[in-house]
Image (cartoon, helix red, strand yellow):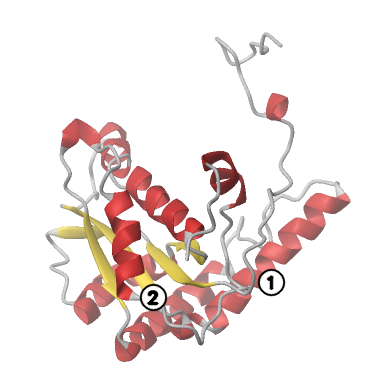
């Protein structure tokens, strides 16, 4: 099933989906393949095309990853700047929005093993000790593909969420999944599942003028 969204509609309505995931509806392998076919059309640094993608549907593996995720979650909720403690300002809508995000993040942590598909994007090598230019170059070789995957999933009625908390225990996750930890870096874990309803709307965001700088840090846009 495709929703026949325009590019702009898909870009504006691809949300991090947690509470609206349908845990009981399997995601067909061929649909995941279609989304990955879109992902590998993405650009990569120096045209390296070095990404790897690991799809997890096995129940025992999902349970093991969920256990690691929840261990990391216990640390995360104590951190400054997490979804519950991030700066909310004084705007009532912003406060309500951030409270919803915190609630949905907790819901996902509580139900992590129920997610039908977990997709892990990987890159060769390790990032530790590399200069910032090298790290950003490497991440620039995986983020476009991961976002393309998520947009393609949205078009097919599948909700996704980019998560990284399991990476607190990346080496243990590598052991669960048979990944050579010294040779490959896990960059995220993208949860995937069909959604209850497909009518996602654009999120409330601050005016572009509040985050835009034109020609210099203090420069104003020409409109």
Residue lying furthest bottom: 60
Q: Is residue 21 above or below residue 213?
A: below
Foreground residue among 2 and 108: 2
Q: Are marks 2 and 1 in contact (CB under 8 Å)?
A: no
The answer to whether 148 appears left or right of 182 in the picture is right
Foreground residue among 196 and 75: 196
Q: Position of residue 176 (x, y in %)?
A: 23, 81
Please say whether residue 187 is visible from this viewpoint. Answer: no
Task: Write down the residue under mark 1.
Answer: 103
Q: Earlier in the sequence, mark 2 or mark 1?
A: 1
Please say whether residue 150 is visible from this viewpoint. Answer: yes
Q: Residue at x 48, y 60 (%)?
A: 2
Q: Residue at x 45, y 73 (%)?
A: 72
Foreground residue among 2 and 130: 2
The answer to whether 204 appears left or right of 143 in the picture is right
Quadrant containing the C terminus is top right
The numbered mark at residue 117 is: 2
Q: Residue at x 62, y 64 (%)?
A: 198
Dot 1: what SS? helix
Q: Residue at x 81, y 59 (%)?
A: 96
Classify 10 Å Cα crowding around label 2: few (below 14), some (14-19), many (20 and above): many
Q: Position of residue 28 (x, y in %)?
A: 36, 76
Q: Is residue 31 above or below residue 185?
A: below
């Amino acid at each position: 099933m495709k929703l026949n969204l325009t590019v702009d509609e898909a870009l504006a309505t691809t949300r991090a989906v947690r509470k609206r995931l349908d845990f009981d509806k399997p995601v067909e392998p061929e649909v995941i393949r279609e989304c990955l076919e879109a992902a590998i059309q993405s650009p990569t640094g120096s045209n390296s095309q070095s990404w790897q993608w690991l799809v997890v549907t096995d129940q025992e593996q999902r349970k093991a990853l969920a256990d690691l995720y929840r261990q990391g979650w216990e640390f995360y909720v104590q951190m400054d700047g997490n979804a519950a403690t991030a700066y909310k300002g004084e705007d009532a809508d912003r406060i309500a929005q951030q409270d919803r995000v915190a609630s949905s993040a907790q819901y996902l942590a509580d139900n992590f093993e129920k997610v039908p598909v977990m997709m892990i994007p990987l890159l060769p090598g390790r990032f530790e000790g590399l200069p910032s230019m090298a790290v950003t170059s490497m991440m620039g070789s995986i983020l476009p593909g991961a976002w393309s995957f998520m947009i393609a999933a949205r078009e097919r009625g599948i909700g996704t969420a980019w998560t990284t908390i399991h990476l607190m225990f990346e080496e243990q996750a590598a052991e669960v999944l048979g990944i050579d930890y010294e040779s490959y870096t896990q960059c995220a874990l993208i949860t995937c599942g069909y959604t209850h309803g497909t009518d996602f709307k654009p999120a409330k965001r601050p005016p572009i003028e509040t985050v835009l700088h034109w020609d210099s840090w203090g420069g104003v846009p020409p409109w």
